[in-house]
Amino acid sequence: MKTDNKGFNTKLIHAGAFDDPYGSAAVPIYQTSTFKFKSAQHGADCFSGKSDGYIYTRIGNPTIRAFEQNIAQLENGYDGVATSSGMGAITTVYMALLGAGSHIISSDAVYGPARGVLEQDFSRFGVEASFVNTSKLEQIQAAIKPNTKVLYIETPANPTMEITDIVACAKIARDHKLILVVDNTFCSPYLQKPLDLGANVVLHSITKFINGHADIVGGVIVTKEAELYKKIRHSMVYMGCNMDPTQSFMVLRGVRTLALRIDRAQENALKVADFLQNHPKVAWIRFPGLKSHPQHELAKTQMKGFGSMMSFGLKGGYEAGKKLMDNVHLALLAVSLGGVETLIQHPASMTHAAVSTQDKLKAGITDDLVRFSVGIEDVEDIIEDLSNGLDKV
Ligand SMILES: *Cc1c(COP(=O)(O)O)cnc(C)c1O
């Protein structure tokens, strides 16, 4: 069925699905590495591009294509490229868009490995990178150099929850002929559509909201234009960052309930945020849905809802953070986010323990900061768990 003109919820269920010979309701798993050609001519046509038949799973596979086309429609893009992980998506985009002598501007609060791979690996091939607070447009302007090719943003930022203005970044990118890339993992296309706001490329760790069930890792890239799509697909295929058919099957199943899951999770999140902002042991809270968030108004203009990610600070600092981690029981003490289950994390003692104090402070990661990903359990149980944990702090 053609779904490009249908509503978002209809696309979630039907976009990318195709008719197979048996009329399967679910897209089947084509668990095969290679595909048999009907004749020498058919093989030749597949290789030359005259036929869109499948050749080899690293290059393309029907189950993977179904997911790529599903997400491309959800993001209102030209087409999608699925990858083995979110980092597979990020490194594929870097490989496709950067080269010796080129420069990328990224966020100082960007997903850690997305920065690490630029500083430790791409630097060895002559790629330069600057990291600024992208929610401050003047810092982006000041970092632009004659060889800047890419502006890379993540909004809301992790774990500071700062918002970057996508429309304003798209204007800067157009004025300076940069490619604007947005990591949309924290929102998913249900809450934010960067390509509609002027971005050229959007990418995701589908490990988080899009799959939503904490049972696979994966990534995806969607472009606005055909030319960028071709470049990025080339890099993915040649570097071998492909998703596999079973991963695609799992995410096609997970994505169907994206809107339902996010609706429930963000409804819960608002109540949790309200509980936390009134708690005597909580020093501060950052959630885009609260009026106290410095960019609450901007969030309202570019996000359809406020999501279910938040961070908060404990008056007792580092020790209080560790104490809370050991005294919550419903919330899983784990990294990752965006699943049906509530997750809690203390960056200073966990994900960012190896980052220097100076870099942590520059990125807004204080010792008292707790990151919370609200799930779809009964909100009374989530709040009771937090309340009991905070009593022990
Ligand atoms: C998790 C995450 C990634 C990396 O994705 P993986 O699937 O773990 O490789 C990238 N960006 C953001 C914002 C993330 O949260």
Image (cartoon, rainbow, N blue to C red):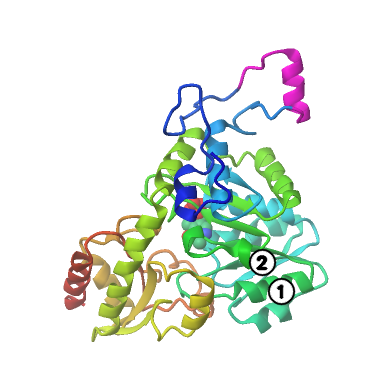
Q: Secondary structure at mark 2?
A: loop
Q: CA distance from mark 2 to mark 1?
A: 8 Å
User: Label 2, on which residue?
Assistant: 198
Q: Cβ(mark 2) to ligand 1 < 8 Å?
A: no
Disc 1 residue type?
A: Lys
For residue 220, say whether it is visible: no
Looking at the picture, how far across and down is residue 378, in whole percent? 21, 62
* CB-based contact (under 8 Å), mark 2 and mark 1: yes
Q: Cβ(mark 1) to ligand 1 < 8 Å?
A: no
Looking at the picture, how far across and down is residue 70, in whole percent? 53, 45
Looking at the picture, how far across and down is residue 21, in whole percent? 50, 22
Seen at 57% across and 42% down, the residue is: 2
For residue 39, say whether it is visible: yes
User: Label 1, on which residue?
Assistant: 171
Looking at the picture, how far across and down is residue 152, in whole percent? 64, 65
Seen at 52% across and 42% down, the residue is: 67
Q: Which residues are magenta?
A: 35-50
Which corner quadrant of the image does residue 240 belong to? top right
Q: Earlier in the sequence, mark 2 or mark 1?
A: 1
Q: Nearer the viewer, residue 138 or 22?
A: 22
Q: Nearer the viewer, residue 330 or 268?
A: 268
Which corner quadrant of the image does residue 337 belong to? bottom left
